[in-house]
Image (tube, grey):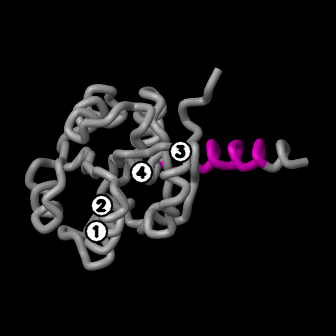
Amino acid sequence: MRNNLIPKLHVNSPYELEIEVLKKNSIEGIIIDIDNTLVPWSEKFADEKVIELVNKLVKAGFKLCILSNGTKNRVAMFNRELKLPAVHNAAKPSRAAFRKAIKLLGTDPQNTAVIGDQIFTDILGGNRLELFTILVVPLSSKEFLWTRFVRQIEKMVLKKYKDSLKNNKE
């Protein structure tokens, strides 16, 4: 049985993600989180780095959709310049939210990736629909109290994941 808490790929940042890896895995659509994935959660707008990443991915042929647990206003403000399809108040890891994003992309689960910084929202939600899940290191340690608590559990899950990778290589 597959562990729904384990990402298919773990990278330091979405900015380090190699397009060739996505292409090799037949990815056509990318669902992406905002807070602590693209910008620290306290940032309201997409910065130049985010805009460059989005342009690079679109130029490479990928369709993108924002999926956020943030409010409608939060997502709209961040997305003002990007103008991507977006789902707000997603209640991740809800399957419905991920299905809605997939529908907006016009893709299928088998050719859709999700990029996010949280195991219990982004990775769990994506894995439940068998998406190509990509976990990134959170951009900021400044977070809501509940998220800080969840991060402690995530550290244990990641340690187990990394230990299993090390054991498989031996």
Q: Please state which of the two labelled residues, at mark 3 or mark 4, is closer to the viewer.
A: 3
User: Which amino acid does the dot numbered 4 rest on?
Assistant: Ile
Which residue is at the front of the view, 70 or 10?
Answer: 10
Q: On screen, 56 above or below 112?
A: below
User: Which amino acid does the dot numbered 3 rest on?
Assistant: Asn
Q: Is mark 3 on a helix, strand or loop?
A: loop
Residue beneath disc 2:
58
Q: Is the magenta stretch mostly helix, strand or loop?
A: helix
Q: What element carries label 2?
A: helix
Q: Which mark is residue 25?
A: 3
* Magenta range: 151-165
Is residue 160 covered in magenta?
yes
Q: What element carries label 1?
A: helix
Q: Position of residue 77 (x, y in %)?
A: 11, 62
State the residue at coordinates (49%, 52%): 22
Q: Where is residue 161 in the image (x, y as percent from the top left)?
A: 68, 44
Q: Which mark is residue 55?
A: 1
Residue contact between numbered discs 2 and 3, judged by CB atoms under 8 Å? no
Q: How far apart are marks 4 and 2 (CA)?
A: 15 Å
Residue at the extreme right of the image, as rendered: 170
Q: On screen, 58 above or below 152?
A: below
